[in-house]
Amino acid sequence: MFYDTTPFTAENSGYRIAFRPGEQNVCPGCGQSHWTIGRMTAECAFCATALPINNGGSFGAGRFTVKSLAA
C-alpha cells in the first residue's frame, strides 16, 4: 500500500466550497441563495447546509501574530 508522505499545502489542494462575503453565494445542496451568517459559518436558510466563511484572514483584537527575532 502506498502512503503519501508529502506535507499538505493549501495552494495545491484544489477548489474548496466556502461562503464568500460580498459575492453571490449559491448553496451547493439546494441551489438557493438565502443565508444565515454567523462568525465562523454561514448556513443555508432552506436546507441547513453549513459552509465555512472565507473572509481572507483574521482581523481584530483576537488575531495571532508571529514576530521573528533578528539574530
Image (cartoon, grey):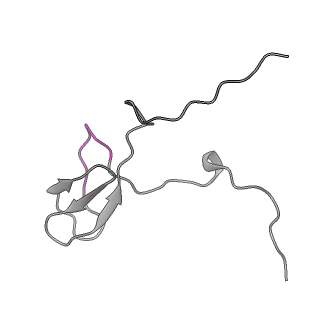
Residue 66 spot, x, y in % from top left: 63, 30
Residue 19 spot, x, y in % from top left: 32, 51
In depth, the one of 1 and 57 nearer the eye is 57
Whether 24 is drawn above or below 36: the answer is above
In depth, the one of 6 and 61 nearer the eye is 61
Which residue is painted at 42% across and 36% down in the image? 62
Whether 43 is drawn above or below 68: the answer is below
Q: In which quarter of the image is the C terminus?
A: top right
Splitting the image into 4 quarters, where does residue 44 fall?
bottom left
Q: Quadrant of the N terminus?
A: bottom right
Q: In this view, does 44 lie to the left or right of 53?
A: left
Whether 17 is drawn above or below 11: the answer is below
Which residue is painted at 76% across and 55% down in the image? 7
Which residue is painted at 56% across and 30% down in the image? 65
Report if residue 23 lies within the magenta region: yes
Q: What secondary structure do most residues of the magenta stretch adopt?
A: loop
User: Outermost residue toward the top?
Assistant: 70
Give the tally of numbered discs. 0
Splitting the image into 4 quarters, where does residue 52 fall?
bottom left
Residue 37 spot, x, y in % from top left: 21, 52
Q: In this view, does 32 lie to the left or right of 71?
A: left
Which residue is painted at 61% across and 55% down in the image? 13
Q: Is residue 32 left or right of residue 67?
A: left
Magenta extent? 20-26
Splitting the image into 4 quarters, where does residue 60 fall?
top left
